[in-house]
């Protein structure tokens, strides 16, 4: 497999929902058996690590940036003739789980260098530190689903992502009272 990062362009490939890893593994295995002049070089799934607190325990998971999509670095067009390279085209298109290329009407368009740099920067940044998984915003109304204030409604005043806690203002006996709860103890109002 070719490791020269200057060769090829990054293309976005749409996959069946939930099939990103399967397509990734299939392409990766096929690339190991190809010769050095093969026009497909690398396959990549952009992911980030997220942490959340569930029932008092901190859990770190991996989340895909773009569910249903993977990236493939390849020379889809022959550099000399600027025509579609059939080997690269069929190599990707015939992997089970691939829907097709993204970009352009009939002709796939690669990601720009700026898009690739931004994406790689985001992925590198996320590898250093896991982001907290936050589904809430300050000022949002939530319902408490666990603890002494179960079934009360409150308004989020502060979010402490590091500890996985929220500070709410809850109306108790007609007075606003601050209450600190963990993310898992509240849910968005329906």
Image: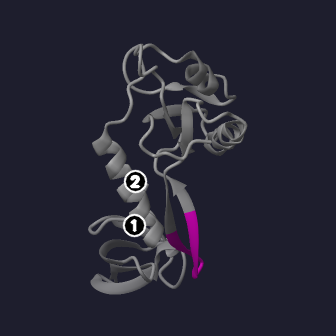
Looking at the image, is 178 positioned above or below residue 64? below
Is 56 magenta? The answer is: yes
Q: Is residue 134 visible to us here?
A: no
Q: Is residue 110 visible to us here?
A: yes
Looking at the image, is 123 positioned above or below residue 98? below
Judging depth in this view, the residue of 123 and 60 nearest the camera is: 123
- Mark 1, other Cα within 10 Å: few <14 / some 14–19 / many ≥20: many
The local secondary structure at tag 2 comes to: helix
Residue 3 location in percent, x, y? 54, 47
Residue 138 location in percent, x, y? 28, 69
Residue 120 has which mark?
2
Disc 2 from disc 1: Cα separation: 36 Å
Horizontal arrangement in the rendering, residue 43 relative to residue 165 (left or right): right
Q: Residue at x 44, y 71 (%)?
A: 128
Judged by depth in the image, the label closer to the viewer, 2 or 1, is: 2
Q: Residue at x 61, y 29 (%)?
A: 98
Of callouts 2 and 1, which one flags the residue occurring earlier in the amino acid sequence? 2
Label 1 belongs to which residue?
Answer: 142
Judging depth in this view, the residue of 74 and 123 nearest the camera is: 74
Region of the chain picked out in magenta, as a range = 51-61
Residue 113 location in percent, x, y? 31, 41
The local secondary structure at tag 1 comes to: strand
Magenta segment, prevailing SS (helix, strand or loop) = strand
Evaluate if marks 2 and 1 touch, with contact meaning CB atoms under 8 Å apart: no
The quadrant of the image that shows the N terminus is top right
């Amino acid at each position: 497999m070719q490791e020269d990062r200057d060769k090829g362009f990054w293309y976005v490939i749409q996959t069946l929902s939930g099939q990103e890893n399967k397509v990734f593994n299939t392409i990766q295995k096929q690339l190991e058996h190809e010769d050095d002049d093969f026009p497909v070089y690398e396959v990549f799934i952009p992911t980030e690590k997220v942490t959340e607190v569930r029932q008092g325990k901190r859990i770190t998971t991996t989340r895909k940036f773009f569910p249903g999509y993977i990236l493939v670095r390849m020379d889809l067009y022959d550099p000399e003739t600027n025509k579609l390279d059939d080997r690269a085209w069929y190599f990707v298109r015939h992997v089970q789980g691939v829907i097709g290329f993204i970009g352009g009407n009939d002709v796939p368009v690669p990601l720009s260098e700026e898009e690739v740099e931004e994406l790689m920067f985001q992925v590198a940044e996320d590898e250093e530190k896991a982001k907290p998984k936050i589904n809430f915003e300050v000022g949002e109304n939530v319902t408490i689903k666990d603890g002494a204030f179960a079934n009360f409604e409150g308004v989020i005043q502060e979010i402490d992502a590091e500890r996985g806690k929220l500070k709410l203002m809850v109306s108790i006996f007609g007075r606003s009272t601050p209450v600190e709860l963990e993310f898992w103890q509240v849910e968005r109002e329906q």
